[in-house]
């Protein structure tokens, strides 16, 4: 039974590859037909995967993921702006700190230790 599932997955991959190959085999002036080839390959692969255990497991996983995403509590606009402000303030303070440390080390090494000024 496992080998049948592998054959279905391999067939789906082959259909996608054939669709992409069809895109490159179509003459340059007919880009719509080439795009249609890719879409047809993807749709055919989707149909094959729909009838495989792997495909059904993926659909179940995607369905569960959507349900979990709907449970997320998103911050309000006010909270978003407040957190953004805190992040910008932290970045500014960190940049100031890094500038002070860099200037202090440059002064220490170039002016005091090496005597170049």
Image: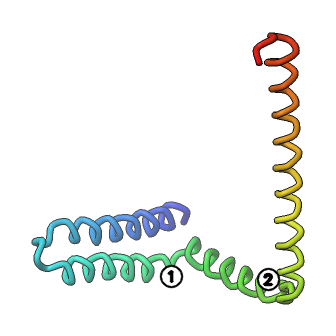
Q: Residue at x 20, y 66 (%)?
A: 24
Q: Residues within 10 Å of mark 1 (few under 14, many from 20)?
A: some
Looking at the rendered structure, the secondary structure element under dot 1 is helix
Q: Position of residue 16 (x, y in %)?
A: 35, 69
Q: Nearer the viewer, mark 2 or mark 1?
A: 2
Q: Residue at x 87, y 74 (%)?
A: 83
Q: Residue at x 84, y 42 (%)?
A: 98
Q: Residues within 10 Å of mark 2 (few under 14, many from 20)?
A: few
Q: Position of residue 84 (x, y in %)?
A: 82, 73
Q: Residue at x 83, y 18 (%)?
A: 111
Residue at the outermost top position: 114
User: Would you name the residue on which mark 1 appears?
Assistant: 50
Q: Which mark is residue 81?
A: none
The C terminus: image quadrant:
top right
Q: Is residue 35 left or right of residue 71?
A: left
The N terminus: image quadrant:
bottom right
Color encoding of the figure: rainbow
Q: Is residue 43 left or right of residue 23?
A: right
Mark 2 or mark 1: which comes first in sequence?
Answer: 1
Pick the residue in front: 37 or 6: 37
Q: Disc 2 vs disc 1: Cβ atoms closer than 8 Å?
A: no
**Is 102 above or below relative to 53?**
above
Q: Position of residue 106 (x, y in %)?
A: 80, 26
Pick the residue in front: 31 or 117: 117
Q: Position of residue 93 (x, y in %)?
A: 89, 54
Q: How far apart, in angstroms, are the residues tagged by discs 2 and 1? A: 23 Å
Dividing the picture into quarters, in which one does residue 35 lie? Answer: bottom left
Q: Is residue 17 left or right of residue 115?
A: left
Pick the residue in front: 91 or 30: 91
Q: Which mark is residue 68?
A: 2
Looking at the rendered structure, the secondary structure element under dot 2 is helix
């Amino acid at each position: 039974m496992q080998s049948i599932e592998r054959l279905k997955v391999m067939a789906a991959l082959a259909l996608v590859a054939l669709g992409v190959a069809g895109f490159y085999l179509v003459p340059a002036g007919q880009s719509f037909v080439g795009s249609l080839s890719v879409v047809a390959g993807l749709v055919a692969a989707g149909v094959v995967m729909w009838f495989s255990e792997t495909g059904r497991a993926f659909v179940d996983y995607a369905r569960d993921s959507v349900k979990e995403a709907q449970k997320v509590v998103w911050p309000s606009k006010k909270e978003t702006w407040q957190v953004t402000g805190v992040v910008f303030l932290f970045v500014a303070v960190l940049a100031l700190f890094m500038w002070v440390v860099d200037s202090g080390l440059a002064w220490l090494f170039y002016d005091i230790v090496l005597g170049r000024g």
